[in-house]
Image (spheres, grey):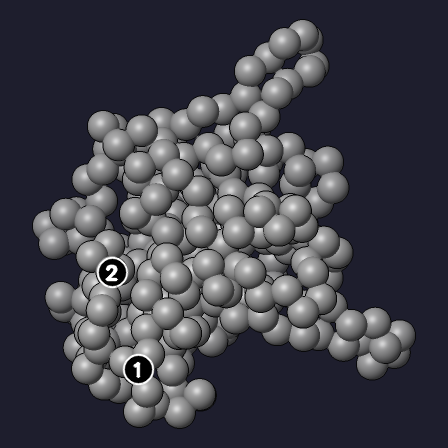
Amino acid sequence: MSDTSKPMDPTRRQFITKAGGAAGAAAIAPGVFLTTPAQAKPADQPVSNDKRWGILVDANKCGNGCNACVTACEEENGWGSANPSEDHSSPEQKAHWIRKVTIKDKATQHVTTLPMMCQHCENPPCVDVCPTGASFKREDGIVLVDKHICIGCRYCMMACPYKARSFIHEDLKDQKPWAPRGKGTVESCTMCVHRVDEDGTPACVEACNAETHKAMVFGDLYDENSEISRELKQYGGKEIRADLNLNTGVRYRGI
């Protein structure tokens, strides 16, 4: 898959200089592999386009009424119920890095619930419309916002077909060092980049596994032996709004 992001300025590159690598899969016999659930990278290697991080969501396994992924993201990144200082904004205005949505098939009445967050597109519209370069995509496919140069124009929010971004309307307290937030800036899911850069797994995926739902799989989409690639190859997966040709890093099954 080609990388079509804009050339990155030095400020962006400061975000990108971290580690790469992955614990892939170990072959134990021809055609038989052991996969690891989280395949991030050591912290002593730079980010590169040799990898593309992604998340597979199996809506068939997503627990009805379960909000563990959302709660985990709130606690990990200090927003929502984990940060009561955002108390002057309306529910519609408050941050929503990840949210649960319910889809009902009018013909069959079948109801599906699934988490919705930044889809970490290969061709992200938010990056295309950003006038300052604050919205950017790392070489490993993670889409972020540089809060230092975000001017709060919100063009990216209008461009995102997934309504995955939020605007901060007020001063905030008790922020997490790895997830700085600021009044007048836009924010969204970072795929827990601070964890990924330390060989970890996004908090939402970890929480889903802890609930034993195992509806979310994180890994390297370019590694054919990673769990996520093997799951997609064997069972398939869909993009939401595939017609937009954004080649999302988040894929869904059961929709």
Q: Position of residue 193 (x, y in %)?
A: 33, 49
Residue occupying the point 74% across, 41% down: 235
Residue placed furthest toward the top: 29
Element class at badge 2: loop
Asked if residue 9 is positioned above or below residue 1 in the image, the reply reads below
Q: Where is residue 50 in the image (x, y as percent from the top left)?
A: 38, 32
Within-10-Å neighbours for mark 1: few <14, some 14–19, many 20+ = many
Within-10-Å neighbours for mark 2: few <14, some 14–19, many 20+ = some
The quadrant in which residue 167 appears is: bottom left
Which residue position holds label 2?
176
The mark that comes first in sequence, 1 or 2, is 1
Residue placed furthest toward the right: 108
Residue placed furthest toward the left: 10
Residue occupying the point 30% across, 47% down: 194
Residue occupying the point 23% across, 66% down: 175
Left or right position of 104 against 124:
right
**Who is closer to the viewer here, 244 or 201?**
201
- Give the spatial CA distance, label 1 vs label 2: 14 Å
Task: Inspect the image, locate mark 2, and give the three-letter code of the amino acid beneath it.
Answer: Lys
Element class at badge 1: loop
Left or right position of 155 against 92:
left
